Amino acid sequence: MPTKPPSLDACYYDGLSSRRRPVRLSVAGGYLLLDGPDGGRSVLAAAVRVSEAHGTAPRTLRFAGESAFCEAGQGPALDALLSALGYRDGIAARLQNRWRWAFVSLASVGLVLLAAYLYGLPWGARLIAPHVPIAAMRSLSDEALAQLDKYLLKPTALPEERRRKLQDGFQELAAADPALARYGDSLALGFRASPRIGPNAFALPGGQIILLDELVALCDDDAEILAILSHELGHLNKRHSIRMLIQSSVVAAITAVWFGDVSYAAGVVGGALLNSGYSRDMEREADDYAAGMLRRRGGSPALLASALEKLEASHLARRAEKERDEDGKSGRIMDWLSSHPDTGERIRQLRENPAAD
Amino acid sequence: MQSDSSAVPPDDAPVEHRLQFTGTGGEYFRIWIVNLLLSILTFGIYSAWAKVRREQYFHRNTLLDGGGFDYHGDPKAILKGRIIAVALLFILSLVEKIAHDFYYPVVLVASPLVPWLMIRSFIFRSRNTSFRGLHFDFHGTYMGLCKAYLIPLIVLIVLSGTMAYFSEQAALEASRQSERAPYTGAILLGSMFGIFLLVPALLYRFKAFQFNHLAFGASRFESRFRLRSFYGIYLGVFVLLPLFAGLILASISVGIAIWAGIETREDLFAAITVLWSILKGNEILIWSLIFLGSLIYITALVVLPAWFAALLTNLVWNNTRLGKHRFKSDQTLWGVSWIVVSNLLLMLITLGLYWPWAKVRLTRYRAERAALLAVGSLDDFVAGATREKSAIGEEVADIFDFDIAF
């Protein structure tokens, strides 16, 4: 005995009025049959367009080229009717109806985001960085420097003669690398003091390198200072700060979108945590660049190594002092926030591998 | 089979049809995460298809009198809209970063586009929403929107200009300790207050424009709003409630002060010193206070807008009709507060993964608090003429058929 052909009750709308007509749906001979008090009709099975299953919501069966359609509640009767019509869900519809696929998707989203952060983002930034106009970076750096001058930096107290000597050494270094010429006038050495930052030197994306008096005082020898400056020139040559800027703005934008619904603050904090300072690879690249530059000028990478040693020692001393002063609260948080490429490893590399290029 | 609405009640007795929402967080999570993965893998291109899936899920799971709503947006039109929007934003930010001097002229030249984009987006959204086979429509025009906004907008621009000018002036005079500083300050405060007072009027005009141009098939929605209701919501949520909360806090602190026997200013200082010394030694206490404080702050940030949205929705629907039928919305402040605060906490705990459940909860609440007060049958609406494709050439319609709303 043949099984009873699938059929179920549904509502029919003609698309011209909001009138709801009850119909009974069934399938026979490759046709969908509609039968109701107002009459019946048949539609070729191939002309029936079934809506995706959206949870438990009623599904629609539309007819190609018509505004009329049927609306039917979900259940085994509808499933039987649809399979008799030869209907099968699309890929995305099947994916989103299974928990297993949801978890696979979740894990994949995590993996893709991680890979994009670790590899895609630095790669993209490296690609874009050479095309960023220096003028735009310059105006950005000027703004940043103005802010720093207002809050963190003080005018230098170095005697003019000392400054001129360092300036000459710096110009000589910069002239040795033709690739730096694209920074034009922006490539300049600026002198500042900052008891709050301590001994340091940093390169701004526009090409300015700021040397702090505290660093000059720390180094016995101008050759060491010049070694540090060539490391900073390395950051400029490789456009590290432009790359970091691109990376951190992308991360900030994405976290802001993701956490946008939670709170803007969470996004900003997330972005700051993921991105602070140069990456390990960037420091190493700048070290290699400085080592090459020092060697070409008849110096030794060991000069940079000894300067880094002094910086590290002074950094540790300052941190210990700060912890004594403030019970270490703010100091500890700042350390946790700043990415910390292990200086010891960098020093060892510079000393042991003076010939590497 | 007897359809529910064919039993016609007498004309004067409206039948209440509550909206029903049948979606669940788990279902939407699966849709959302698959959408997210495919959008990432296709560099955002799939996001247009994802939007259609999401809209269809929420439309189809919203039922009125047993029948579902439907969404018909074309993903390609949405993709086109997104490309246009991203390009516009990119150009604007590029101009701002690189050619700063041209930024305001460019914004000025581009600003007439904004009402046009708004109208296109309303039209797209309403025409692609249907119920019982009839599509909604939007009849607002560019000139109509400009007219509705013209006067309040001019006032707003004048006030903003005054504010911008006098805030610089005030800073300058304050630094010089000029005698005119108080007058400048007063003008500055006045213009800020003027802007504050103007916002409800803008909102009133906007909602009136939006709802009086909305149609279901050939039937137009009609809204009768009163300006003072908008001022009522605005003042209530952003002035009176914070004031009330402040008063409660103040009376609690005064109560504690009296209970603790603080009478003179020296007593107060002493109490603060004691509190301070307790705090200073206790890192856990400090961090929990900071945590509590930021929690209250964030809560206020989400609760006030949620209250505002709930009251606005109630106001709009309770004063809107469609033919003989009326609408009702009865969201309560407690109801939305509970939902948005618990959503926020769960989203923080799950790093945002709770989002689909949060969205479903809010949607369900909003749907189930809304009702159609039907007078007679729902069978009598007919399709509008705009669905006929003869009016404009299809290609032209296709070029301008995009959705810019995110």
Image: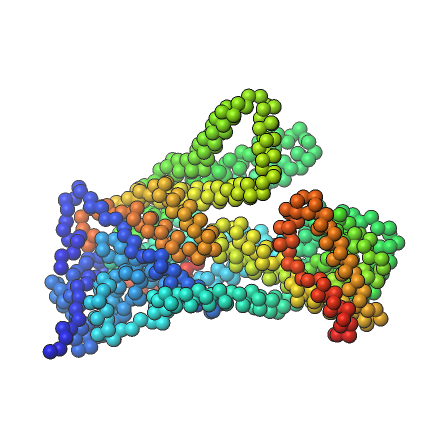
Outermost residue to the top? B263
> Would residue A297 appear left or right of A112 to someone viewing this image?
right
> Nearest the camera: A139 or A120?
A120
> Would residue A143 appear left or right of A52 to someone viewing this image?
right
User: Total of numbered circles in the picture?
Assistant: 0
The percent coordinates of residue A333 (x first, y second) are 62, 50
> Nearest the camera: B308 or B358?
B358
Q: Residue A137, relative to residue B370: is it above or below?
A: below
Q: Residue at x 63, y 46 (%)?
A: A329
> Would residue B347 appear left or right of A307 to someone viewing this image?
left
Outermost residue to the right? A161
Q: Quadrant of the N terminus of chain A?
A: bottom left
Q: Residue at x 48, y 60 (%)?
A: B85
Choose top left, top right, bottom left or bottom right for residue A121.
bottom right
Q: Quadrant of the C terminus of chain A?
A: bottom right
Residue A198 visible (yes or no): yes
Q: Residue at x 74, y 65 (%)?
A: A347
The percent coordinates of residue B72 (x first, y second) are 33, 62
The percent coordinates of residue A309 (x first, y second) are 77, 60
Choose top left, top right, bottom left or bottom right for residue A216.
bottom right
Residue B151 visible (yes or no): no
> Nearest the camera: B233 or A251?
A251
**Which scheme is used to colour this image of the protein?**
rainbow
The percent coordinates of residue B246 (x first, y second) are 48, 32
Q: Residue B22, relative to residue B44: is it above or below?
A: above
> Would residue A66 appear left or right of A268 to someone viewing this image?
left
Q: Residue at x 26, y 64 (%)?
A: A59
